[in-house]
Amino acid sequence: MPKHSEVASRFGDKLRKLRKKKEVSQEELADRAGLHRTYVSSVERGERNVSLETIDKLARALNLSLRDIMP
């Protein structure tokens, strides 16, 4: 099993907490952000090195700023 970067893991943890706090499912977040649900799931598990554009999409989908979503 590949080792995930600490930054990707921290971002994934923060994204999951914010998503759950807003009571949004992974599928709903993915739909709002124009992403696939399995992609969002892998981001939350820290398995993806997410681009700034994708981080912006996720933040907007949760009605948050980039500052809010970064760990």
Image (spheres, rainbow, N blue to C red):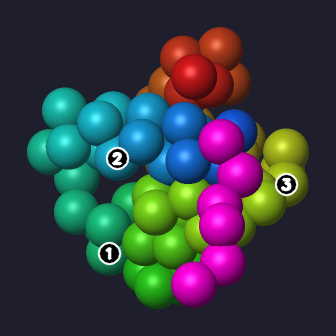
Foreground tag (1 vs 2): 2
Residue 48's spot in the image, x, y percent? 69, 67
Side of 42 relative to 48 (left or right): left
Numbered tag placed on residue 69 in the rendering: none
Residue 69's spot in the image, x, y percent? 55, 27
| Along the line of sight, the residue nearer the viewer: 61 or 20 | 20
Q: Earlier in the sequence, mark 1 or mark 2?
A: 2
The answer to whether marks 3 and 1 mark residues whose Cβ atoms lie closer than 8 Å is no
Task: Give how far apart the Cα atoms at labels 2 and 3 are.
Answer: 17 Å
Residue 42's spot in the image, x, y percent? 52, 73
Task: Give how far apart the Cα atoms at labels 1 and 2 are.
Answer: 12 Å
Q: Which residue is mark 3?
A: 51
Q: Amino acid at mark 1?
A: Glu
Foreground tag (3 vs 1): 3
What range is drawn magenta here?
A: 1-6
What residue is drawn where x is 43% and y is 72%?
41
Whether residue 65 is situated above or below residue 41 in the rendered picture: above
Q: Which residue is mark 2?
A: 16
Q: Earlier in the sequence, mark 3 or mark 1?
A: 1
